[in-house]
């Protein structure tokens, strides 16, 4: 199979620095050891570079195993959805390769291709696989409050599902500027992709998302000793300053983000040490009690929170 790895980036640090680390670790390891992989992987980064005088939606550049898609788009957190849909445009309309699956990650995610390579053939084509599932918590959005979406640090989806998201997603492009058709969810790509999944699958949309085990490595050091390299595709390496408890989606650079690069380097060393025979997709799926809890109100303390979550999202859209 052909797999496209798509990195959402910017032209500035820490994104520029982290993508370079991704090239020097994940991409280099793949290119040096292609005979060890069953599937073929192509790597892309996409970022905004507004060119006022240009009418072209994007430009494409090849650079040592990484294809850069420069989008004629404003840069910023609240244009990540537009950037992602426009990168899908390129893959669907202009790319010479039709991919079987797309892995959309951000600059803070390390991918263990050796694990991915052994399980991706068993992934369902109507499911988005992700590191975590989040909840819409904007109280002013009655329609989407307590609905869920796949967190944006890693989403694995089939080519067909990418096409479907792109098709329904066109109506949400720049909707934060529309006086008549705004929706009260954060105008960022993972939140809006979640809304697209509701449009595509209807009331049972939640059955088309699957959380996978992942490594969370936020500490301000290059230590990756806690990482599980055989049961996790993704590792979230975004470094949090010692005074912070929540990483959020800030792109601001600081001295601690330089540890991200050290983590990339150490994770690839650990990945190359491991043996991966016998790994199955089911090994990567956490027990429901072990999944990162989404934000809900637990009404009955006798009912486990993980059961309440699934009951809420199952019935809320059927009322």
Image (cartoon, helix red, strand yellow):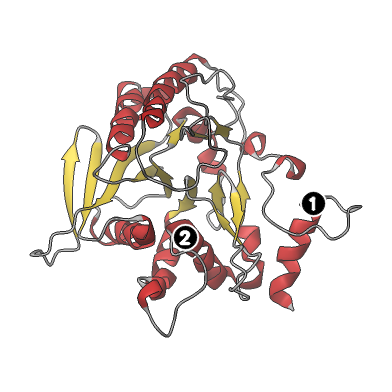
Query: Which residue is drawn at the image coordinates 65% and 59% (left, top)?
Result: 207
Location of residue 231 in the rendering, given as x and y in whole percent from the top left corner: 60, 30
For the N terminus, which image quadrant? top left
The residue tagged with tag 2: helix, strand or loop? helix
- Dots 1, 2 in contact, CB < 8 A: no
Q: Is residue 91 above or below residue 146?
A: above
Location of residue 31 in the rendering, given as x and y in whole percent from the top left corner: 30, 26
Q: Nearer the viewer, residue 109 or 164?
A: 109
Question: Which-is-in-front pick, marks 1 and 2?
Answer: 1
Residue 167's disc is none
**Residue found farthest to the front:** 243
**Residue 100 left/right relative to 134:** left
**Residue 121 left/right relative to 134:** left
Location of residue 6 in the rendering, given as x and y in whole percent from the top left corner: 36, 46
Q: Residues within 10 Å of mark 2 (few under 14, many from 20)?
A: some
The residue tagged with tag 1: helix, strand or loop? helix
Give the CA distance from mark 1 to mark 2.
Answer: 30 Å
Query: Which residue is drawn at the image coordinates 55% and 42% (left, top)?
Result: 246
Query: Which residue is drawn at the image coordinates 74% and 45% (left, top)?
Result: 288
Q: Residues within 10 Å of mark 1 (few under 14, many from 20)?
A: many
Q: Is residue 300 above or below residue 32?
A: below
Residue 161's disc is 2
Q: Nearer the viewer, residue 173 or 74?
A: 74
**Residue 231 left/right relative to 264:** right
Location of residue 119 in the rendering, given as x and y in whole percent from the top left corner: 55, 37
Q: Which residue matches tag 1? A: 305
Number of callouts: 2
Picture quadrant of residue 319: bottom right
Q: Is residue 208 above or below residue 195?
A: above
């Amino acid at each position: 199979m052909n797999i496209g790895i798509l990195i959402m980036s910017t032209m500035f640090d820490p994104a520029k620095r982290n993508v370079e680390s991704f090239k020097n670790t994940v991409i280099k390891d793949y290119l040096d050891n292609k005979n060890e992989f069953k599937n073929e992987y192509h790597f892309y980064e996409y970022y905004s570079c507004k060119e006022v005088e240009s009418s072209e939606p994007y430009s494409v550049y090849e650079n040592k195993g990484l294809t850069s898609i420069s989008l004629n788009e404003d840069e910023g957190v609240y244009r990540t959805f537009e950037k992602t849909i426009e990168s899908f445009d390129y893959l669907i309309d202009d790319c010479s390769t039709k991919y079987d699956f797309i892995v959309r990650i951000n600059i803070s995610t390390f991918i263990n291709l050796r694990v991915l390579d052994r399980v991706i053939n068993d992934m369902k084509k109507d499911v988005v696989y992700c590191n975590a599932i989040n909840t819409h918590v904007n109280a002013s959005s009655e329609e989407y409050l307590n609905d869920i979406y796949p967190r944006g640090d890693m989403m694995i989806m089939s080519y067909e599902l990418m096409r479907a998201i792109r098709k329904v997603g066109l109506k949400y492009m720049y909707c934060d500027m529309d006086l008549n058709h705004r929706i009260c969810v954060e105008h960022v790509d993972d939140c809006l992709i979640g809304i697209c999944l509701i449009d595509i699958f209807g009331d049972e949309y939640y059955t088309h998302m699957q959380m996978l085990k992942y490594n969370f490595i936020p500490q301000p050091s290059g230590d990756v000793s806690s990482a599980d390299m055989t049961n996790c595709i993704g590792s979230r390496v975004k470094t949090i300053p010692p005074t912070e408890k929540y990483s959020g989606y800030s792109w601001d650079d600081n001295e601690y983000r330089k540890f991200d690069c050290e983590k990339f380097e150490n994770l690839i060393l650990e990945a190359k040490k491991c043996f991966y025979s016998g790994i199955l997709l089911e090994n990567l799926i956490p027990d429901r009690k072990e999944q990162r809890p989404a934000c809900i109100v637990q009404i009955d303390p006798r009912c486990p929170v993980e059961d309440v979550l699934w009951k809420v999202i199952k019935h809320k859209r059927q009322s």
